[in-house]
Each structure stands twice: as structure tokens, then as C-alpha cells.
Image (cartoon, rainbow, N blue to C red):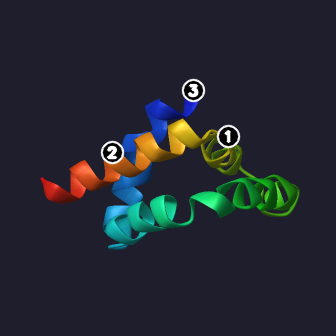
């Protein structure tokens, strides 16, 4: 739940690059691969740095949290 305070920032970044709809779709359609994506982020963190990757990885590890973020993005797109 600690990543929810960052959702607005993440959605703003995705919206800026016009990837918010695509990201929402990928989070829902790629649900079986989210855990692998989280592990890839954990592995790459020492090379690319930043706590942002750790927060995203934690969100991807929790299926309920991932689906809630996808709904959050979808609601933001519809506004």
C-alpha cells in the first residue's frame, strides 16, 4: 500500500508520454507476467538506481494492488 501515494506521479508521467492507456491495458492483460516484471525490476535496480523501481516492483508483486493501479489509470484516462 505504500506505493499508492506515488500513483498520481506515475500516472502523470505516463500521461505525459501518452502511455497511460497502454500501461493500464498491459497491467491487466499481462497479469500473469507481472511477477516476472517485478523480479526484473529488482534485479536491474542496482544498475539503474532509484527507489522508484522498488516501488513499482512492490506494486507489481501484489495482484490486487496492480489491478487497483490499472483501474486508477483507466479512470484518469476517462476523465
Residue for badge 1 = 58
Tag 1–tag 2 contact (CB < 8 Å): no
Residue for badge 2 = 72
Indicate which label's residue lies in the foreground, 2 or 3. 2
Mark 3, secondary structure of its residue: helix
Q: Is residue 22 above or below residue 38?
A: below
Q: Is residue 68 left or right of residue 3?
A: left
Mark toward the start of the polypeptide (1 vs 2): 1
Distance between the alpha carbons at the discs numbered 2 and 3: 15 Å
Few, some or many residues within 10 Å of mark 2 (<14, 14–19, 20+): some
Residue for badge 3 = 2
Q: Is residue 62 left or right of residue 48?
A: left
- Give the residue displayed 42% in from the left and 40% down from the top: 68
Q: Position of residue 63 (x, y in %)?
A: 58, 42
Mark toward the start of the polypeptide (3 vs 1): 3
Mark 2, secondary structure of its residue: helix
Distance between the alpha carbons at the discs numbered 1 and 2: 17 Å
Mark toward the start of the polypeptide (2 vs 3): 3
Amino acid at each position: 500500500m505504500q506505493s499508492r501515494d506515488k500513483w498520481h506521479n506515475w500516472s502523470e508521467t505516463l500521461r505525459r508520454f501518452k502511455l497511460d492507456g497502454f500501461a493500464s491495458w498491459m497491467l491487466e492483460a499481462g497479469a500473469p507476467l507481472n511477477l516476472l516484471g517485478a523480479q526484473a525490476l529488482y534485479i536491474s535496480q542496482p544498475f539503474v538506481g532509484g527507489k522508484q523501481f522498488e516501488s513499482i516492483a512492490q506494486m507489481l508483486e501484489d495482484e490486487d494492488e496492480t489491478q487497483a493501479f490499472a483501474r486508477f489509470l483507466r479512470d484518469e484516462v476517462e476523465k
